[in-house]
Amino acid sequence: MTSLSHNRNPTGKNQHGGIPGADDPILCDALRKYHRERLVNNGTISSRLRSDHGIEMSASTVKRCRKEIGLMGSNTTMKVIDQDEAEQMILEEMDRDTAKRSGYLSFLVHPYCDQTQCFRNFVSDVMHTHDGDAFAMHNPTSKRIFRHQ
């Protein structure tokens, strides 16, 4: 009787060649860099890896590597982490800004975003709730002047 589980490719070589895995330091650094740039589209990341680093990788492989590293987009992050925890991270970043001059968009690129991304609206709501005065003085020179004709 013959074996039913015959391996047709015992060496494991296929047409795709050697694709680096999530343990490759160059790939990890590149994926973290793109994550800090808030680039979460796997197809776009795949094309950027090809152009920037010469790494040929499909979008589904990029998705799998990002998941192994623990990089998630804002939608997944907001489902996984607790609202109070996300709010506390934003409040800690607000405490670091002693001049109260940073807006909500600049908080999206602060160091806490290396691993965690939140919705822009969520960050804005938390900042407006806890420190509305800072938004009044955020950039007083940029207010539009209405002139009557």
Image: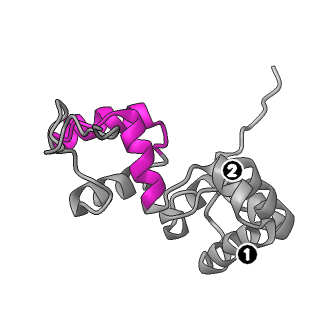
Tag 2: residue type?
Phe
In the rendered image, the quadrant that contains the N terminus is top left
Indicate the secondary structure of the residue bearing disc 1. Answer: helix
Q: Which mark is residue 88?
A: 1
Q: Is residue 27 left or right of residue 88?
A: left
- Image marks 2 and 1: residues in contact by CB distance under 8 Å: no
Q: Which residue sits at x=81%, y=19%?
A: 149
Q: Quadrant of residue 21?
A: bottom left
Q: Closest to the observer: 62 or 97?
A: 62
Q: Which residue sits at x=45%, y=44%?
A: 63
Tag 1: residue type?
Gln
Q: CA distance from mark 2 to mark 1?
A: 14 Å
Magenta stretch in the rendered image: 39-68
Q: Residues within 10 Å of mark 2 (few under 14, many from 20)?
A: some
Q: Is residue 68 left or right of residue 52?
A: right
| 34 shown above or below 87 | above
| 56 shown above or below 101 | above
Residue at image mark 2: 119
Q: Position of residue 42 (x, y in %)?
A: 44, 37
Magenta span includes 34 = no
Q: Which residue sits at x=68%, y=69%?
A: 90
Q: Closest to the observer: 86 or 147?
A: 86
Q: Is residue 15 left or right of residue 22?
A: left
Indicate the secondary structure of the residue bearing disc 2. Answer: loop
Q: Quadrant of residue 25?
A: bottom left
